[in-house]
Amino acid sequence: MGVSGDEPPPPPQQPPPIPTISTSTRGQDLEKGEEISHREQPQPQPPPPLMKMNNNNNTINNEDGERISRVAMLQRLNPTNPLRIAINNSRVNTPSPSHGHNPPHVLHSSQPRSTPTPLQQSSTSLNSTQYTDKFFLFLFVLHMVAAIALVGFLVFKAIQGLIQAKGRKEHEEKTLLRYFLPQVEVSSLLSIILAFSWQWTIRIWPYFMVHFILWSTFFISLSAGIFLICLQNPPTDGIGVCFIAFSICSGLYACWVSQRIKFCSKILVKSLESVPKFQDLNKPAFWTLLVGFIWISLWIFAVLGALNFYFPPLVIILLVLSLCWTAEVMRNVVNITVSRVIALYYLRGMQSNTHFCFQRALTKNLGSACLGSLFVPTIEALRVVARALNLLEGEDEFMFSCAHCCLNVMDTIFRYGNGWAYVQIAAYGKGFVRASQDTWELFVREDMEEIVDSDMTSALCFLTGVCSGSTCVIVAAAWTAKMHQPYTATVSLIVFFVGYLMTRISMALPHACVSCYYTCYAENPTNRLFDKTIKERQAMIKSGREVLVPTPRIPHR
């Protein structure tokens, strides 16, 4: 810094303006008002100089200060950031921190509205390259190798049975191929159509679809149960009774959550507002369903081949469990992909590449998806059991003790494994357990436990799967009863299973959007992308104007 003599110091010089940094993907600028991560902030006043600077030195100092501030700002950015950085509408390369000399003292701006919270700053960066939950990733890969080998062997046994069977055995094999396989394949295609239909309609008419899903599940599952009972066959009668019992439970649930529907619809509408900004956001679900259809087609052949192998019931049970885990992992891969795209939009104003996020979910975050696919469904099942015990505790001391024991266990387990974890897994590359803990801590910090605990999105996605499965049952059971009635019960179970799994994969998109809305709001409630819907809900709950039905994982206070 140039100085001169003992002349009195001039008035303080204003620092040069910091250029605005804008982010874009594929050369497209974000819309006005969407970029929240890098905004021009007012700089604090520098200390007055001790000695006078002449006019030439003022010009040099201004240029040096601008250059130092610009280099320092670029060095603070992650060099692996996938965004293109533009300064004054011209692209520049992000300098690596290892190059060049370190600038002297650089003044830091005050914290912007979207500055990460302390919890976020201590977490893994947005571009973490580490693989999460490696043990479960290895376990799933090992499982897939064994599953592919088993399915391939059983498909060979099925083909061998068709070629070499003679007499009565040959007739049975051809009957299975003629009256069993077509129904399941057609139901798989029907389930894919229904899956995208549910997703499309819930994105177009979210208010209407919340009511429609609740009551259509009741009527369709009831219709499927009545139809199976009308076939007057003991196996189908048993399945029909189960459908009717479930329809009654779903009807009671629709009445029970009637007070939540308005708020749930608002959150669904707000969370889906960001989806049109990403035109290819549905491609991961499409490709996943295509792979699922191919795998299920081979799986059906493997079930036929299991009938020609030792211990057919045990082999079929193993195939069913394998398909459950595989389909759940596929659903969570779509969930993590969508969660990363939407979360980075909320947290940083980024318009990320969906293909890159899909590739990341299939590699670095796959281990967490595998662990969550085993953990979360188990927790949800325990949640139903705990809720049932909580309702039945009454005055019986034993039931009272069991109910509260389950409540404490559920409260502890839920903090270490919950479905909200996928947002931080996708955004920060955390492991499943750590992401679950950090996410729940965010909800506790913002006093959102009761709100997220009463969220209906997961239940709505589950009910759409049941509704699709019931529709497939009606179609396949009617077809099979007309062609070969003894197979009706078996075909009904399989097509329900397939229809449910396919629909759950497709419904991962709206589910992930809602999860991102809650989680990102808890991380930064002052973000201007969020409105006052959640704050107003919290105020109503605190004032007693809104009564929430308690759920098992929130202990009595």
Image: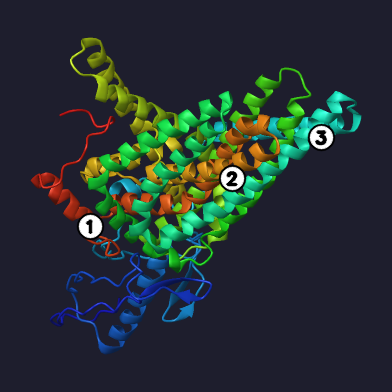
Residue type at the position of mark 3: Lys
Q: Which residue matches tag 3?
A: 174
Give the residue at x 38% y 67%: 73
Q: Residues within 10 Å of mark 1 (few under 14, many from 20)?
A: few
Q: Residues within 10 Å of mark 2 (few under 14, many from 20)?
A: some
Q: Position of residue 409 (x, y in %)?
A: 32, 23
Q: Seen in the image, is 353 located left or right of residue 30?
A: right
Q: Nearer the viewer, residue 81 or 173?
A: 173
User: Sequence-wise, which precedes: disc 2 or disc 1?
Assistant: 2
User: Sequence-wise, which precedes: disc 2 or disc 3?
Assistant: 3
Q: Residues within 10 Å of mark 3 (few under 14, many from 20)?
A: some
Q: Name the image quarter holding residue 550.
A: top left
Give the residue at x 19% y 77%: 51
Q: Seen in the image, is 182 located left or right of residue 215?
A: right
Q: Which residue matches tag 2?
A: 475
Q: Seen in the image, is 12 located left or right of residue 126?
A: left
